[in-house]
Amino acid sequence: MAKTDMENFVEAEGREAKVKAVRQKIDALGIEYLYLQFVSITGRICGKGIPADHWETMAQRGFQLVYGATVNLFMNRHQEYLGYGPEAAELVGIPEPETFCQLPWDKRVARVFCTLFRNREERENPGAFLTSDCRGNLRRLHESFQGRHGLQLRSGTEPEMMWLKRDENGNPDGGYSKPYCYHIDQFESLRPVYMRVIEYSRAMGLDMIQGDHEDAPGQLELNTNFDDCLKNADRLTTYRQICAQVAREFDLIACFMTKPFMGVSANGCHHNISLWRGGEQVLRTLGQTTRGAMDEVFTYTTGGENTFLPEGEDPQMPGKVGQQTIGGIVAHLDALTAIGCSTVNSYRRLWDTGFWAPIFADWGYQNRTTGLRVSAPGRFEFRSVDSMVNPYLMAAAILASADDGITNDIPCGKPEERNIYDAMEAGKLVKKLPMTLGASLEALAKDEIIQSAMPGEMYRLFNEYKTDEWERFNHNVSDWDRETYLDYLP
C-alpha cells in the first residue's frame, strides 16, 4: 500500500535530525510550552498548546482538532457551522521543526507552524494533505509553479495598522498619534511601542528594514525584507502576533481593521512581488547573539536573476516575464479583489476617494492611481489589498495570475503614466474594480484561474464564509439606516 501524504511528510529525509535539533533548543533555552499553530481561512492563528515534554510525540503523531477550526469554528447567520458540520472528522496537525521559534516576551514558550492533514481513519484519502490548510496549499502551489517555470515568487508586504487608545471601558478612543504623514514627531510619540515591536520582530527572524508614520491617527507602517512568498506570509503572521502582544503590554489596541475611520487613509497592505531564477539561502543574525529559533527562521533567499528587470532601453518597461505577469494580474484583478479586499469593511477603503485607493484595473510605472504599479525596476506593487488579507491566499492567487500570464503570454499593454482620473477624462476606457464584497465574490465565482489558487475544499469554504459575511451585512440594520430613514416620511 502506498504511503499517505502524512507518512511521507513525517518520514521526509532530514526531518528526524531537525526534530532532535528542536529538542536541543528546548533544553538549552528552558522552553516549557509550545504553541502548535496553523492559519485559518481568514488569516486567524489557531492551534493547540502542549508542554514541551511531549515534543517528540507531537512531532511524530501530531495533534487533532475539528476540521471546522480552519474556518474559525464559526456559525453562519442561520446558526449552522460554516464549512464542516459537527459530524466531520478531526484534522491532524504535524509540526514543522524548522519553524520553531522562542517567544521573546515569554521565553518559556515557543511557537511551531504546522502542516494539516486529513484524519488517518477517513474512508477517502486518509492522511492526505488537508486542502482547507491555506498555508500548506501555498507551499504546494509554489513548488508546482517552480517546477513548471523555474521561477520563485519573492514578496515583501507593507502592513499598515493603527495604534488606538482605549477609554475607561476598554473601547477604542481614537488614534494614539495625530494623522500627519511621515511626521517624525508623531513617529517619535509611538517610539516606545514600535521599538518594542522591532525588538520582538528581530528576535523572531524578521529583518526590519524601514518604518514611518502614515496619514491616519496612530498609523504606522513597519516593513520587513522580502523573501520567498511562504516565508513572507509566515513573517506577516508573526508580525501580527507581535503587535497584539505589544498592544497588551501598552494597554493599546493594535488595529489591522481596514477602515476604522472615514476621511483618513485606510490600512493597506501592498504586496511587492518579483519572480527570480536561482539564488541562495543566507543566514542573518539580526543582532541575536543566541538565536532562540532554528536557523531556517533567520534564513533569507538572496541573489539570482530577477526576471522583472527591464531588458530593453526603456528603464520603465519590465522584461518579458514581468510583462506577462502584469498581463495576468490585470486580467484577473476583479477576482483578485475578493482575496485582497476580503471583508465588507475593505470596500470603505475603495469608496473613500482622494486617499490613493486603487480602484481601477490598470498598471503604470510609479502610478499610485492604478491597481498595479511598477514601484521600482524589478519590483511590482500589487495595491488592491489591505491589512485584513490572508497572505497565504493572496500569494497563491498572485501565483495563479502569473502562471496564466506566462503560460498564455497575456499582453500587458502600455503603462499608464497619467493620473488615471485624468486619463479617463481624456477618453480612456478603464474598468473599475468590484466595489462591494458581494460583487468581488461574483467575479471570483466566474474566474476558474483564481479559483485554482484555492484547491480542493478551499474555494468552497472561502465562498461560503465570505458569502455569509456579505449576507450578514445586508441582513443588518445599522446606525446609518436609522439616522437616514427613521423620519424619512412623511
Image: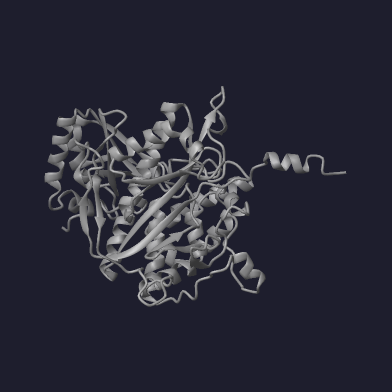
Locate residue 424, reporting x and y percent.
Answer: 63, 69
In-front residue for pair 456/385:
385
Q: Is residue 39 left or right of residue 23?
A: right
In-front residue for pair 348/188:
188
Residue shown at 17% from the left, 38% from the top:
22
Quadrant housing the N terminus: bottom left
The answer to whether residue 416 is seen in the rendering is: yes
Q: Quadrant of residue 34?
A: top left
Residue shown at 46% from the left, 35% from the top:
188
Q: Is residue 424 left or right of residue 146?
A: right
Locate residue 444, reporting x and y percent.
Answer: 50, 62
Question: Given the current orientation, which residue lies at the most extreme right position?
Answer: 490
Up the image or down, 433 lies above or below 109; here it is: below
Q: Quadrant of residue 32?
A: top left
In-front residue for pair 128/19:
19
Q: Quadrant of residue 427?
A: bottom right
Q: How is this picture coloured?
A: one colour
Question: Given the current orientation, which residue lies at the most extreme top position?
Answer: 168
Locate residue 361, reporting x and y percent.
Answer: 54, 66
The answer to whether residue 445 is seen in the rendering is: no
Quadrant housing the C terminus: top right
Number of callouts: 0
Residue shown at 30% from the left, 40% from the top:
202
Up the image or down, 103 lies above or below 451; here it is: above
In-front residue for pair 437/328:
328
